[in-house]
Amino acid sequence: MYPFPVFLFLTILCLLGSTADAIGVNWGTMSSHPLPPPKVVELLKSNEVSKVKLFDADPLVLQALSGSNIVVTLGIPNSMLKTLNSSRKAAESWVHDNVTRYFSHGGAGVRIEYVAVGDEPFLQSYGDQFHPFVIGAAMNIQAALTKANLGGEVKVVVPCSFDTFVSESGRPSKGHFRTDLNKTMIELLTFLSKHHSPLFVTISPFISFQQNKNISLDFSLFKENARHHNDSHRTYKNSFDLSYDTLVSALSKIGFPEIDIVVARIGWPTDGAANATSSIAETFMKGLIDHLHSKTGTPLRRRNPPIETFMFSLLDEDHRSITSGNFERHWGVFTFDGQAKYHFNFSQGTKNLVNAQFVEYLAPKWCVVNNNKDLSNASASALEACSTSDCTALSPGGSCSNISWPSNISYAFNSYYQQNDQRADSCDFGGLGLITTVDPSVDTCRFFVELQTSHSTSAHEAYIFLRIILLLACLFSCLLGFTW
């Protein structure tokens, strides 16, 4: 769906001169109907993506990556940190099942470069839920890798969130780690330095722009006409450098001024909020790519850019948490079905970004509101539908925020209908729903058709099977009653 030529990832991957492998992408799988892993690996390979960062160790994903020659950062979910902190045996078991089993020793297998312990476990909104267990978990995973003779092959890292470091004044020179994390960060950086591992960290110009009235959109998008920010004798021309040097200052204050930095997440969402659009995301990505390609570094680290940068994200994910905002489900450079969202021209490289090929969808059917019914309670039904499906495009500033009533009701109904594999009963809504084969999409508001997955097929078949069993049971009961 929506095939069109775009120019993006080849240029991303040709950044930093000879270090083309220094650019990768995050591949998340928090989707109700994920694109099949082999199809995603095809997408990565066809766009010559050489590095990918995962958030867990899904066996199907690792099997698909086996033999691909793509370098992998393997993730450990936050939910496992407490166990891995308290049990070295659990760490050894995890390493055996997810690293040793798949690791490539120069042949077939998965080229695992890093194990990322936790997914931004220091995020301030988590409080103390995870961070007390991070260092112990990291040390146990390191010990398990060493025991498996992989200590020199795979490095252990901890992805740090954008709010791990702060500057109340907004000046990079005043940057420091959060007070509640200071001791933990010293322990983490000591551990990383000992094992020659880099610091993984998120830089988020979009969230900085949202939260800081002194950060302009032009400053976030690397625009040349943006008002500069001055910090003593240093001049900052964009939000990326401002955040990066805030981190560098924080590192220097606790004695780690030279540690290597990997930008583990950076991107710009395309929906779910004001200024989250494909055109703005395109401008941001082009500016970021040009800046990284220039290898100028930042005022505090001149000619010393991050050793690796992972774009966030490869695909949209409709099951991502929206605690931080509805835009969280729209970070993908590609839509959920592997179709590129935007294009732009680069000074180097003109090869088109390749969309996912031969994607399998459910039938071309949609659920819309039946205008011939009494719609006085339709809004309540739509809210209920949105409580368990993805309606983030209807958010203020979203791609569907401008459609009027009752089209917005139809969008909610269809979202629920698609998430439930187009089951007829999922378009009921007390008789208010109507299944149609006419695409109700309007302008930029796309009424999507969900992907065909093994999950959707098996669920539908199980549902049909259950209905048949119930009908047979009812018939049998009736026959017995008639006999008696």
Image (tube, helix red, strand yellow):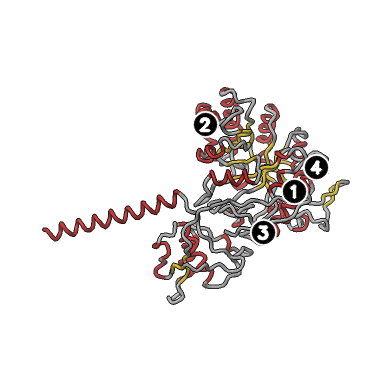
Percent position of residue 35, x then y: 53, 49
Mark positioned earlier in the residue sequence (4 or 2): 2
Looking at the rendered image, the disc whose residue lies closer to the viewer, 1 or 3, is 1
The answer to whether mark 2 and mark 3 are in CB contact below 8 A is no
Mark positioned earlier in the residue sequence (4 or 3): 3
Whether residue 249 is visible here, answered yes or no, is: no
Q: Which mark is residue 295?
A: 4
Element under disc 1: loop
Q: Amino acid at mark 4?
A: Lys
The answer to whether mark 2 and mark 1 are in CB contact below 8 A is no
Cα–Cα gap, marks 4 and 2: 38 Å
Identify whether 441 is placed above or below 131. Answer: below
Tell which of 431 and 259 is nearer to you: 431
Q: Which residue is mark 1?
A: 349
* Relative horizontal placement of residue 352, taking residue 480 as reference (left or right): right
Looking at the rendered image, the disc whose residue lies closer to the viewer, 4 or 2, is 4
Identify whether 131 is placed above or below 242. Answer: above
Tell which of 278 and 42 is nearer to you: 42
Q: From the image, which quarter does the C terminus lie in?
A: bottom left
Q: Which mark is residue 278?
A: 3
Identify whether 22 is placed above or below 441. Answer: above
Cα–Cα gap, marks 2 and 1: 41 Å
Cα–Cα gap, marks 4 and 1: 17 Å
Q: Which residue is mark 2?
A: 94
